Structures are given as C-alpha cells and as structure tokens.
Amino acid sequence: MTKEEPIFVEKNEWNNSLLLECIKEKKEKLIEVADHKGLTSKETVKCSQELDVLLNLVQRQVSL
C-alpha cells in the first residue's frame, strides 16, 4: 500500500514533512542505539551517518 499525496499540500511541502519525519525517527533510533551499543559502535556510527545525509538534504533545500 502506498501513501497518496494530499491534494491540498504542495508537493515540496509534502516532501519536506516526510523528510522531517524521517529525521525525527532517525534521531530517536540513534539515541536508542547509542544508549544500548555505545557511542563508538559501528551501528551507532552508521545511524549517525544516515542522519547526516538526511540533515544535509534539508540544508540543501533551505539554501535554494
């Protein structure tokens, strides 16, 4: 099942809200992994790098 875009929301706004939700979820995951595995674990570092990618996407959108 796929999510359909609401008609009343501009496409870029919808993408931004999805991106912000992904960032929120990734932050929560990062905190959880770091608490359980430690700050220097491979899983924590990987999660942090994934969060960096998402944050860079937001930064690029803001700078346009």
Image: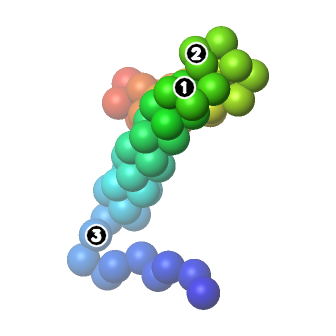
Residue holding disc 1: 34
Quadrant for residue 6, please give it: bottom left
Give the amino acid type for the residue marked by disc 3 in the picture: Val
Q: Residue sitting at 37 percent across and 61 percent down?
A: 14
Q: Which residue is mark 3?
A: 9
> Within 10 angstroms of label 2, few (less than 14), some, or many (20 or more) residues?
some
User: Label 3, label 1: how many angstroms apart (C-alpha)?
Assistant: 36 Å
User: Relative to the observer, which residue lies in front, 54 or 11?
Assistant: 54
Which is nearer the N-term, disc 2 or disc 3?
Answer: 3
Q: Earlier in the sequence, mark 3 or mark 1?
A: 3
Q: Residue furthest right?
A: 42
Task: Please state which amino acid type lies under the numbered disc 2.
Answer: Leu
Q: CA distance from mark 2 to mark 3?
A: 39 Å
At a point 31% along the width and 65% down the height, the residue shown is 10
Of all residues, the one furthest to the front in this rendering is 36
Q: Nearer the viewer, mark 3 or mark 1?
A: 1
Residue farthest along the left direction in this orientation: 8
In front here: 17 or 48? 48
Q: Which mark is residue 14?
A: none
Front residue (pair 63, 43): 43
Q: Of the residues tagged 2 and 3, which is closer to the observer?
A: 2
Left or right: 44, with 21 as reference point: right
User: Are the two marked residues, 2 and 1, in contact with CB atoms closer than 8 angstroms?
Assistant: yes
Image color mode? rainbow
Q: Residue at x 39, y 43 (%)?
A: 24
Specify the quadrant that holds the C terminus: top left
Image quadrant occupied by the N terminus = bottom right
Q: Which residue is mark 2?
A: 39
What is the three-letter code of the residue carrying label 1?
Answer: Ala
> Which percent across, then down, holds residue 21?
39, 52
Apparent side of residue 37 relative to residue 22 in the rendered image (left or right): right
